[in-house]
């Protein structure tokens, strides 16, 4: 069944304009057709189309349910956006597909990009959420200075992944605690500045490596997130 995103569907009983147009103009759905909608907060609604208005399609809610989380605790990925915007857009899509609660674009000393189109990233996240049949839309922050994020993040598990071999690290897979709210820092292509690494370590972040392979920024962020998922899945078996 086709799934739509309607964050206020319970109160408005309508689909947003973009989803209304897709529903009526593209899919040619008519009054009486059934569809599914999610609110991005974990709820799934089975609906019947009541008014096929391509700008504000009205629905009748037939049933609703709280979708169970696929992963047991929040995962935040804080990553320095790549110079090529296509690569960070790809990362957002894939993180949403495998499951993430928050994405924080980091402004670091060696960052290749100082500005991002957050609205576009959020649209990509919505599309990925619907495509992967999820009901949770992750929070996507505006560009955040590294030092400010370090000071504000309070997750129980806080990890910084970097390449500098002179500062001891342990494998994330051996450090991550299953089921624990977790935040992972991933630096730019030029890696974190040593002063940034020291600031994070002095603030209680644990130093980790993702293995012996040399990874691009977006690959490292995806590997880090999926490592948490794999360990959680093994723990739950």
Image: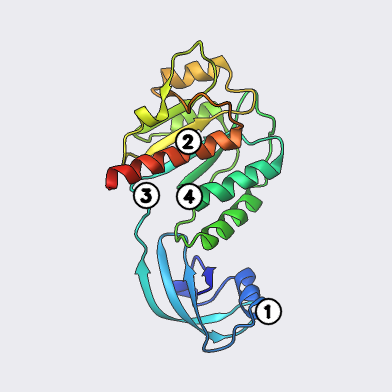
First along the sequence among labels 3 and 1: 1
Q: CA distance from mark 1 to mark 4?
A: 30 Å
For the residue pair 115 and 131, the one nearer the viewer reads as: 131
Quadrant in the rendering for residue 171: top left
Whether label 3 touches label 1, CB < 8 Å: no
For the residue pair 142 and 174, the one nearer the viewer reads as: 174
Give SS at disc 2.
helix
Q: Which residue is mark 3?
A: 71
- In the image, which disc is placed on residue 198? none
Q: Residues within 10 Å of mark 2 (few under 14, many from 20)?
A: many
For the residue pair 128 and 231, the one nearer the viewer reads as: 231
Residue depicted at 60% across the width and 71% down the height: 19
Whether label 3 touches label 4, CB < 8 Å: no
First along the sequence among labels 1 and 4: 1
Image x and y of residue 208, in percent: 44, 24
Q: Which residue is mark 2?
A: 224
Q: CA distance from mark 2 to mark 3?
A: 14 Å
Q: Quick check: 223 above or below 132? A: above
First along the sequence among labels 2 and 4: 4
First along the sequence among labels 2 and 3: 3
First along the sequence among labels 3 and 4: 3
Residue depicted at 42% across the width and 68% down the height: 44
Image x and y of residue 27, in percent: 63, 78
Q: Which residue is mark 4?
A: 98
For the residue pair 87 and 114, the one nearer the viewer reads as: 87
Horizontal arrangement in the rendering, residue 29 relative to residue 149 (left or right): right
- In the image, which disc is placed on residue 25? 1
Q: CA distance from mark 2 to mark 4?
A: 11 Å
């Amino acid at each position: 069944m086709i799934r739509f995103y309607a964050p206020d569907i319970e109160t408005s009983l309508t689909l947003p304009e973009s989803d209304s147009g897709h529903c009526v103009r593209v899919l040619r759905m008519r009054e009486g057709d059934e569809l599914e909608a999610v609110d991005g907060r974990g709820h799934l609604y089975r609906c019947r189309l009541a008014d096929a208005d391509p700008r504000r399609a009205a629905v009748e809610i037939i049933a609703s349910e709280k979708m169970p989380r696929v992963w047991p605790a929040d995962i935040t990925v804080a990553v320095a956006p790549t110079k090529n915007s296509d690569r960070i857009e790809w990362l957002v899509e894939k993180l949403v597909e495998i499951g993430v609660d928050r994405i924080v674009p980091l402004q670091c000393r060696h960052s290749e990009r100082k500005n991002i189109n957050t609205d576009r990233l959020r649209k990509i996240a919505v599309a990925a959420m619907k495509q992967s049949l999820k009901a949770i839309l992750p929070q996507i922050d505006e560009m955040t200075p590294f030092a400010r994020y370090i000071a504000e993040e309070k997750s129980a598990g806080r990890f910084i992944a970097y390449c500098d071999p002179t500062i001891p690290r342990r494998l994330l897979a051996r450090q991550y605690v299953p089921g624990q709210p977790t935040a992972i820092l991933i630096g730019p292509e030029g890696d974190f500045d040593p002063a940034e690494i020291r600031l994070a370590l002095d603030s209680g972040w644990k130093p980790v490596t993702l293995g012996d392979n040399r990874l691009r920024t977006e690959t490292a962020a995806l590997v880090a997130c999926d490592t948490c998922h794999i360990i959680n899945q093994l723990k739950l078996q």
